[in-house]
Amino acid sequence: MKRSANRPKDDPITRELARHLFSSVPDLMGTVLKRSAFSPNIKERRDYSCGLFDRRGRAVAMGDHMPVHLGSMPATVEHLLAAPPRAGEMVAVNDPYAGGTHLPDITLIAPYPLRSSRPRYYVACRAHHSDVGGVSPGSMPPGAREIFQEGLILPPVRLVRAGKVEPDLLSLVLANVRTPREREADLRAQISANRSGAIRLEELERRCGVGTLQAWAAAQIDYTARVVRSFLRRIPDGSYRAEERMDGDGVSDRPVRLRVRVHALRGRVLVDFSGTDPATPGNINAVESITRSAVYYVFRCLVQEEIPFNAGCFSALEVRVPPGCVLSAKRPAAVAGGNVETSQRVVDLILKALAPALPDRIPAQSAGTMSSLTLGGSDPRSGLPFTYYETVGGGMGGSPSGPGLPGVHTHMTNSLNTPVEALEQAYPVQVVRYSLRRRSGGSGKHRGGDGILREIRLLAPGQAALLADRHRFAPQGLRGGRSGKPGRGFHRSKRTLRIGSKARVQLETGESIGIETPGGGGWGRSRARRRGRAA
């Protein structure tokens, strides 16, 4: 068949050009968000994600931001299409049971064109706000038993109407958080990010044409789906199983079991989590969109060809999550830790299952935790409340290609650290120690990366909370490599007390909280161990 004169090209050069054009939309949105946000968590750590979706809600392009956001944001947009935003509106949502992740992640979605009654695209940005209320500063309370303890719940609500912020709704939100000025500034930064995405789309339509751009968007999704299906056909047929245990749920120390079966048959892959423990009383429960996000992340990483992150990454995978298990929690289960901790362990679980099928591709286990640390109190310099939130990096697992990196964020988190200077300027705290945790990575032919030691002293009374994992079950090595060291938390006052991986602590002036994050597992048997075995 001859190509129609009106049909845009779909050759490799045009396809690659289109990929970069579409990715420029979420990239620009992310740049605007980080430069205009007020909180260190967004402007310094870059704890946000941006995406572009077609009118059917399919992801066209997503920025290389936070993987835990990017795989779950399509569920948010899909949920919203039942009552989509109209011309001049932007919808805010953080409800995990309406396509969200956990309450601190507020997603703002706008149609494009902004003032059209028939959208051709949607732009969306998700940012982690350092406080949205709840029983403890930072809205990540270990031991929470229901979502109402974790903060303010926003079902899909029109934060912007006719191009202007709804003042009554904004007042309601700000009345329920500890740091209202910071929250308002960050929300307005998200509005600006969506508007910048719309401006960029308008430029692309003028340059390429409305019809051509839409055809290219569909072609990007189709191409990605073809590449992923091609990779899946290279997985040997068979059923691959794995089991992992989490430390506990913050209410009980009973380990929580995760199970998976990855079934591959002639390019069709089923990921089945049957046998996973039921939802827990504590807040390590994950909604299903988070579980799917971890699945999509793993398979996208294993595809050797560089591909865009869009709906085509997801279409070839079948995922089964038993309703009501810890990986598919139901309202009103608490879920703050499911987003940050359980998602990481799902990645470990799937990679562990695939190790026999892809022995030259799968790395040893990385830290396996985001090690979320929150602080809050009253700043004596201003008399105003403050909240601080950060995820602390750890060791990357060794892999067939080389040793793991030390002191980095891995897998479902892609954020940076908060620089000491920014942290001490913004909050009444002093960073006592911040270093690599030497020799915490597992030995092997390719050694695991070292974890991090971070200790922070409060210069005013306040509360601290640690929401982490892998303090009991260390990251495992692979192919004969040794395990990394497990994590450890501590509270230092007149003496040093060890705290669990999920703990809340009241701190007086001069007291500190610290964490030693896990090291990555080693890959392959080291030469010394091989020589010893031969002798």
Image: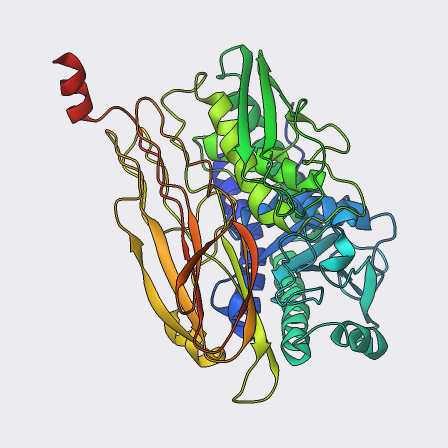
Please, is residue 119 above or below residue 72 in the view?
A: below
Q: Is residue 34 left or right of residue 447?
A: right
Seen as rendered, the residue at the extreme front is 494
At which x and y percent is residue 363? Answer: 38, 31
State the image quarter where residue 311 is shown. Answer: top right
Which residue occupies 25% across, 30% down?
444
How many marks overall? 0
- Quarter of the picture holding the C terminus: top left
**Residue 416 sits above or below residue 356 on the image:** below
Residue 309 visible in rendering? no
- Determine whether 367 is above or below 29 in the image: above
338 or 460, nearer to the observer: 460
Along the horizontal axis of the image, is 6 left or right of 158?
A: left
Which residue is found at the position 65% from the left and 42% from the top?
290
Q: Quadrant of residue 265?
A: top right
Residue 525 % position (x, y): 25, 23
Residue 435 is situated, as x and y percent measured from the top left of the image, at 30, 59
Q: Nearer the viewer, residue 99 or 85?
A: 99
Residue 386 location, quadrant: bottom right
On screen, residue 71 versus residue 478, left or right, reads: right
Seen at 23% across and 29% down, the residue is 445
> What residue is at 44 percent from the left and 58 percent from the top?
497
Q: Position of residue 367 (x, y in %)?
A: 42, 42
- The answer to whether residue 249 is seen in the rendering is yes
The quadrant in which the N terminus is found is: top right
